[in-house]
Amino acid sequence: MKRHFLYIGLSALLAVSCRTSIPTEISTQESPPPEEKTEILYTFDEYKSSNIDFGALSARQKDYLVDSLLGQMSMEEKIGQIFMLAIRHTANGRPALELDDYLKAYMDRYIPGGLILFTINYSSPEQTRRFISDLQDHSPYPLFITTDEEGGQVSRLGSTPGMNVVHLPSAYELASTGDPEINRYASSVLAMDMRDLGFNMNMAPVADLRTYGRGDMMRARSFGNDPGIVGRMTAASVEGFQEYGISSALKHFPGHGNASGDSHDGAVASLSSLDDFYNREFESFRMGIEAGADFVLMAHIAAPSLTGDNTPASLSYKIQTEILREELGFEGIIITDAMDMGAIKSHYSPEDAAVMAFSAGTDIILMPENIPSAQLAIKEAVTDGRITINRLNSSVKRILSLKFEKGMFVPGSEYHEILKENDKTEHHNRLNELLINK
């Protein structure tokens, strides 16, 4: 017992001595680790009833939320998400200008994840805004709503009288300014006009190189023949569109400019060599991907130098998964070109085309020739194991995640962002001045 007290006394004396001689010495004793905070995970139902900012969530929280919604969806709803369908006409061949019973039944039967509209669907800004809003309200899930608005000869909105949407010059004319900043501004003005109507996606920009001779398929739709110039202009378009809420779709991968013909009419192949693709054709797509493009649209051209056969890129695992996903690192949504084009429908049944495209890596099948046949074929392929449920879920999850990121699931959000007429006029006039001065 005495030895114990002596030990305590010496210890105390030593401690006092140490404090006296080294008054600023920091204790070497480790502090207890801070308590680990538990991350709150939100279900989709909780998200709908709150003001949660999806963009502020962690990757784990986002993953959990999207999985929560995915778990509520039926097989038919999941399959619907991987189809983007066209709306042109309603009953008896009349132009579809409003949501009627015929279109409600169409939407209810196919439950599409997106819709593409055409010139025939636009009569005025008010009509278009109301039509898109009604389509969104009727759909159980937010829709990608898109059109082809490249500028130049491919202009569904800008060339329609009374729509008050800027009609951009062709890509070739924009590139001739030599200034990507002008193109970025031009794309942002178009994006604001499109958002004003309710669109959230544009089938643009064209990232293909122009190849003189051999039919010159792209002509003025391309920014040109120089990979660097085309790449910078493509990236500027992507940034201009997406900064103002319009998802862009780079087209037509792996590059349509050196094709032997028009894939609208029948089977065509690219004449580009392996070196051409990797050192020229891919460059503009790389730059568009780096700029943040949400979509890449697959061409229906064959590329024998890449695949060793004549399989169209839209049906090729090599081109979509091995090259676009794995080599170029694209993490966004892969969408086919229209599947009712001659290059596909002349050589593949709607059923085979849908299953082949999805198996190759496609996330969204655009405009199948026969909608019920294509959707049933996907369902049967999942049921018999040719397409795994995980493969289906991965595409649906990618689609839903982008819709969350774009604020499309925000409760009570508007589908359009209406521009004041004075602001619209100011932007149009400023763009015209920039183009004239160049």
Image (cartoon, rainbow, N blue to C red):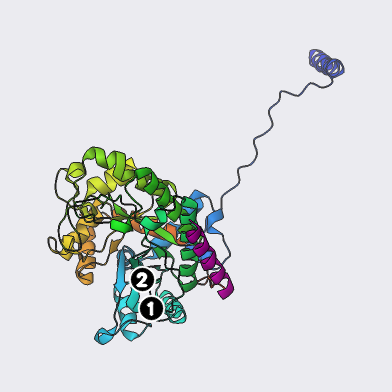
Residue 330, compared with residue 364, is above or below; it is above
Q: Is residue 56 left or right of residue 214?
A: right
Work out which quarter of the rendered image holds the N terminus and state it.
Answer: top right
Q: Quadrant of residue 337?
A: bottom left
- Distance between the alpha carbons at the discs numbered 1 and 2: 9 Å
Q: Which percent across, then down, holds residue 412? A: 54, 72
Please name whichever residue, 125 or 230, is drawn nearer the observer in this view of the structure: 230
Question: Residue 198, how many percent across, how many down?
Answer: 46, 71
Q: Which residue sits furthest left? A: 347
Q: Which mark is residue 63?
A: none
Q: Where does the image place residue 290, in percent across and percent down from the top left?
A: 43, 46
Tell which circle, 1 or 2, labels the residue nearer the N-terminal end: 1
Say few, some or many: other residues with alpha carbon within 10 Å of mark 1 (under 14 / 14 to 19 / 20 or more).
Answer: many
Q: Main secondary structure of the magenta part?
A: helix
Between 186 and 139, which is closer to the camera in this rendering? Answer: 186
Q: Is residue 391 visible?
A: yes
Q: Which residue is mark 1?
A: 122
Instruction: Say which amino acid is labelled 2.
Output: Arg
Task: Write the start and end of the magenta stretch as one range.
Answer: 421-438
The image quadrant of residue 30 is top right
Residues at marks 1 and 2 touching, judged by CB atoms closer than 8 Å: yes
* Residue 196 place in picture, x, y as percent: 49, 71
Task: Identify residue for label 2.
Answer: 156
Hey, what amino acid is under mark 1? Tyr
Relative to 302, is 136 on the left or the right?
Answer: right
User: Does the segment drawn in magenta span residue 193?
Assistant: no
Q: Residue at x 82, y 22 (%)?
A: 24
